[in-house]
Image (spheres, grey):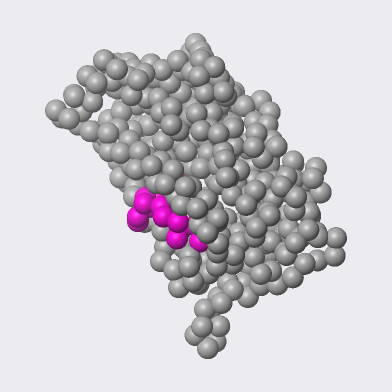
Amino acid sequence: MATEGSSGPLIQIVGAGIAGTAMAHGLLLHGRSTHDLRVVDERPSPPLEGAGIQLSPNAIHALAALGLSAPPNACRPEAIEVLQQRSGREQRLARLSLLDFETRFGAPLLTCRRAALQSHLLEALADRGLTIDWGHQASIEAEPTGDLAVKATSPWRIMATGVAAAPRRALGLAPLAEPSGVALRGWIPAAEGEPRIQLWLGAGGHAVSYPLDDGRTHLVVCAADEPAARRVLEHLPSRCADFTPLGTWPLTDPRHIATEADYQHPDWPGMVWIGDAAHPMLPHLAQGAAMALEDAAVLAPHLAHSGLGQSAALRHVLARRAARVARVQRDARSNGRIFRLGGLAGWARNWALQMAGPHLMVRPWLYGNRPSG
């Protein structure tokens, strides 16, 4: 149903994280009004948890397509280094300069705190006159008769609920992700010299550090479990001994590679899933936030004008998104395996990085992408 002063049927976005707020920007940009758009989130306040994230050039292009700039004061690393600790010494296997990314891909690679990006999106929504309904739990449940239904005042819903399994289970849909290790996150002192991203490889796990906008450096250690992650931490450079923990987060691996049906299930034609709710992925390509932003930039023009009902046009757009996201999921999973290689396989990986590291580390198909419907 349309509301007074609206430009169409009411759209409810469930979830006010990066995916949900980015989608709200896209819908407003493409003609929806604040009268026919509602964003709800069951959390009592903005989700400002988390630590560092990477915004690669494709993420910056997605933000631009949503009418947004990058977060102010985001850090601009000058390089990515791939390293290995051997016998107490740090060996550099490869170095990729990021100084020419803006020339090559039309935008730089940036890093920032997740909270900085989230605040940036929320403040811009407030400037556009949209208020988030915090502490509001959307009712998604089975009817007493056993027939599954979404009880809502809105005929159209965009689900930006992250990797949480409960919303999908309530609709009789299987979860998309399963546990696949842990990430130990925290702060370490900044490295001397140029701001740079550093990746340490190891047979038991790997670690990556990001310089951030507030002058701190974020460290993530990924391994099969927390004891293994702490063993990896013990073998990192001495400055990592001053590690200030933020906590341990589960890593989630997609149960299957993304398909069109993960965005819009045929049994629920009035509902579209976006971000991690549609395509969970491992963090080993640093593309989770970027894919959420791309979802909004690509899907918002269609959803704003044509709605969420199943159509050939929407299926075409969703199929294209699923194909791109599936490639990202595969590469993220592959990176995780390569990062942890040991023995002869690890030696071969190191040799390849030393011979052709910058070429192997750049993905033009990923970084050069500009959103299109």
Q: State whether residue 326 is above or below residue 192.
A: below
Q: Which residue is rendered at x = 57% and y = 24% of the image?
A: 107
Quadrant of the drawing holding the N terminus: bottom right
- Using the image as rendered, state which of residue 202 and residue 366 is in the foreground: 366
Tell me, yes or no, if residue 277 can be seen here: no
Disc count in the image?
Answer: 0
Q: Which residue is rendered at x = 52% and y = 59% of the image?
A: 312
**Magenta region: which residues?**
247-264
- Using the image as rendered, state which of residue 16 and residue 312 is in the foreground: 312
Quadrant of residue 125 within the rendered picture: top right
Q: Is residue 333 magenta?
A: no
73 with respect to 341 (left or right): right
**The residue positioned farthest toward the bottom in the image shown:** 145
Q: State whether residue 185 is above or below residue 153.
A: above
**Residue 140 locus on image (x, y percent):** 58, 71
Q: Which residue is rendered at x = 41% and y = 28% of the image?
A: 363
**Residue 246 locus on image (x, y percent):** 50, 40
**The residue positioned farthest toward the right in the image shown:** 5
Q: State whether residue 257 is above or below residue 72.
A: below
Q: Which residue is rendered at x = 75% and y = 61% of the image?
A: 8
Tell me, yes or no, if residue 292 can be seen here: yes
Q: State whether residue 238 is above or below residue 63.
A: above
**Residue 319 locus on image (x, y percent):** 46, 52
- Using the image as rendered, state which of residue 12 and residue 72 is in the foreground: 12
157 with respect to 103 (left or right): right
26 with respect to 237 (left or right): right
**The residue positioned farthest toward the top in the image shown:** 193
Quadrant of the drawing holding the C terminus: top right
- Using the image as rendered, state which of residue 92 and residue 157 is in the foreground: 157
**The residue positioned farthest toward the left in the image shown:** 344
**Residue 41 locus on image (x, y percent):** 65, 59
